[in-house]
Image (tube, rainbow, N blue to C red):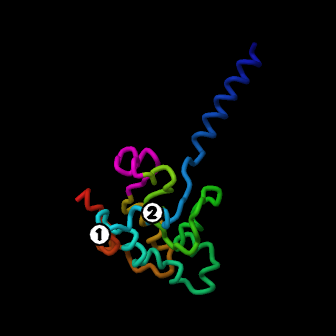
Amino acid sequence: MVIRSLMIVCFFIFLGSSNMTAQEYDYIGAAKCKMCHNKPATGQQYKIWSEGPHAKAMESLSAEEAKDPKCLKCHSTYYSVDEAYIATLTPEEGVSCETCHGPGSGYKSNAVMKDREKSIEKGLIIPDENLCRTCHNEESPTFKGFNYDEYLKKIAHPVPAAE
């Protein structure tokens, strides 16, 4: 009886710990985001991103830097996440949508995206200054300070319905 009770307790501890450490969502890549976020009516977020510095982050690296994990972790979403959660994300995307907004497999559907709370429940991250500072900080050899409000304006990609 004691052994059975102990086994049941161990089972629930194992079950609980695996749920706490498991990531639920996969990285789907900017091409999937483009399907909905490239239309004028929805704000052309993909177009704005693709023409900005985050999409070109890999291009800014020298050949040597493009092999350095310390550089890659901030210049490409692909190299900053666990490979097991990469669905269709590519290294060439640079700092993709999902660096700032979280892995998109859970919130990519239009039905979910129309509901902000549901999107957040399904993995959407609303980025803030702390998130940006995970890369824009003194650890970077090219860091020259970071004014969050100023730089946020340079990459702004608003959602018209939210304005």
State which region is magenta.
110-126
Element type where label 2 sits in the image: helix
Residue 105 place in picture, x, y as percent: 51, 53
What residue do we see at 49% from left, 62% from top? 32
> Quadrant location of residue 151?
bottom left
Mark 2 / mark 1, whichever is N-terminal? 2
Q: Is residue 119 magenta?
A: yes
Element type where label 1 sits in the image: helix
Residue 40 place in picture, x, y as percent: 30, 68
Marks 2,1: beta carbons within 8 A: no
Q: Quadrant of the N terminus?
A: top right
> Which residue lies under the disc numbered 1?
149
Q: Nearer the viewer, residue 14 or 103?
A: 103
The circle drawn on residue 25 is none
Residue lying furthest top: 1
Residue 79 place in picture, x, y as percent: 59, 68
What residue do we see at 31% from left, 66% from top? 43
Q: CA distance from mark 2 to mark 1?
A: 25 Å
> Quadrant location of residue 90?
bottom right
Looking at the rendered image, the disc whose residue lies closer to the viewer, 2 or 1, is 2
What residue do we see at 62% from left, 38% from top? 17
Location of residue 108 with respect to 96 vertically, above or below? above
The residue type indicated by label 1 comes to Asp
> Which residue lies under the disc numbered 2?
33
Residue 107 place in picture, x, y as percent: 45, 51
Q: Residues within 10 Å of mark 1 (few under 14, many from 20)?
A: few
Q: Is residue 150 magenta?
A: no
The number of discs equals 2
In the displayed structure image, the side of residue 65 where residue 30 appears, left or right: left
Q: Nearer the viewer, residue 122 or 34?
A: 34
The residue type indicated by label 2 comes to Cys
